[in-house]
Amino acid sequence: MNSLIHVSLKVKNKKVMIVGGGKIAERQVKRFMNAGSSVLVISPSLTERLNHWWNQGNIQWQQREVSSTESFQCDILCLVTNNHSLHHLLQLNNQHVSIIYRADDYSLSDIGFMNKIEEKHFTVAWTTHGASPIYAKILKNDIEERLPLRKYDSDLAFLEKARNMIKESTLSENLKWECLNEICTKEFLESENRSENVHKLLLSLQAKH
Ligand SMILES: C[C@@]1(CC(=O)O)C2=NC(=C\c3[nH]c(c(CCC(=O)O)c3CC(=O)O)Cc3[nH]c(c(CC(=O)O)c3CCC(=O)O)/C=C3\N/C(=C\2)[C@@H](CCC(=O)O)[C@]3(C)CC(=O)O)/[C@H]1CCC(=O)O
Ligand SMILES: NC(=O)c1ccc[n+]([C@@H]2O[C@H](COP(=O)([O-])OP(=O)(O)OC[C@H]3O[C@@H](n4cnc5c(N)ncnc54)[C@H](O)[C@@H]3O)[C@@H](O)[C@H]2O)c1
């Protein structure tokens, strides 16, 4: 049984607490800060970049050591110190927090972070489930070379607009469904003027019904 579900998690305005202020904390902070979460770091020290973000007012910082009996009120708790037993006890004492990330042990973590290639309209994400993070990184080149990611992205930019037009049309649900399938065919996508062809397709179907 695979006990993992791969999701896209919306973390804007979520309260994220990061215990630890080293290199791995930096990676987590960057991720959540850029996604619009409210980030609080608790650590006696910060890396230079974390310190910069704190100075800029992008994150909050409590300069202190966390003790193993503490209880936190937050949506996501990231345990990213270099202290395995502290993580273990904090996880036990914070069962009320439904998402706890443990940087020291993938198998005990509620979430894992995937490798990804992001285009505007398209994301490819993969994971080796911690089997080999370095191999996972190497795969990036392989995926970039083998997949026509720019083409997918440009197709999707077109399809997003076309799909909205179809959804907003007065066609019946069945005909809308037919259109949505039609615009995804290779022939349609590779046709000379695909944007104009969407208008034509809609007009011809509307005229018939
Ligand atoms: C995708 C990405 C997301 C993220 O985390 O941001 C990610 N690692 C990234 C960067 C990165 N990782 C490492 C380096 C230094 C080496 C280098 O520079 O090459 C760097 C680069 C850096 O730090 O800059 C090495 C490393 N990573 C882990 C360990 C083991 C350990 O710590 O025990 C080791 C020690 C080596 C070993 O033991 O083999 C563990 C994990 N790393 C994962 C994901 C998860 C498993 C994913 C999977 O298996 O597919 C997992 C389990 C974390 C988790 O999800 O809990 C991000 C991609 C950024 C990008 O796109 O470039
Ligand atoms: N997930 C990954 O990709 C990955 C990769 C490498 C390492 N790791 C794991 O992440 C851990 C952290 O790595 P790092 O390179 O950031 O370590 P680091 O030593 O650079 O940073 C540890 C940070 O934790 C802080 N800290 C220590 N005790 C604390 C306490 N009681 N309360 C609050 N803060 C405390 C330290 O002040 C420091 O800022 C490693 O020990 C390892 O288990 C994960």
Image (cartoon, grey):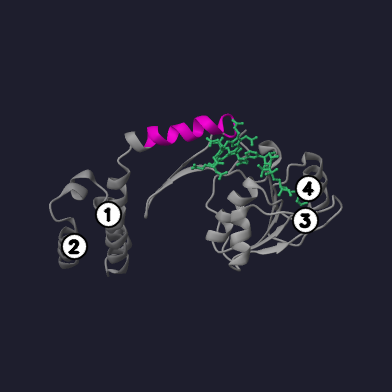
Residue behind label 4 places its C-beta within 8 angstroms of ligand 2: no
Pointers 4 and 1 in contact (C-beta within 8 Å): no
Residue underneath mark 2: 205
* Circle 3 crowding by C-alpha within 10 Å: few under 14, some 14–19, many from 20: some
How far across and down, in percent of the image, does residue 174 sit?
A: 30, 58
Question: What are the residue bounds of the magenta stretch?
Answer: 129-143
Amino acid type for the residue under numbered disc 1 = Glu
> How far is the residue under mark 4 from the one under mark 1?
51 Å
Residue underneath mark 4: 91
Q: Earlier in the sequence, mark 4 or mark 3?
A: 4
Q: Earlier in the sequence, mark 1 or mark 2?
A: 1
- Give the residue at x 18% y 64%: 199
> Of discs 4 and 3, which sits in the foreground?
4
- Give the residue at x 69% y 37%: 105
Q: Quadrant of the N terminus?
A: top right
Q: Which of marks 4 and 1 is nearer the N terminus?
A: 4
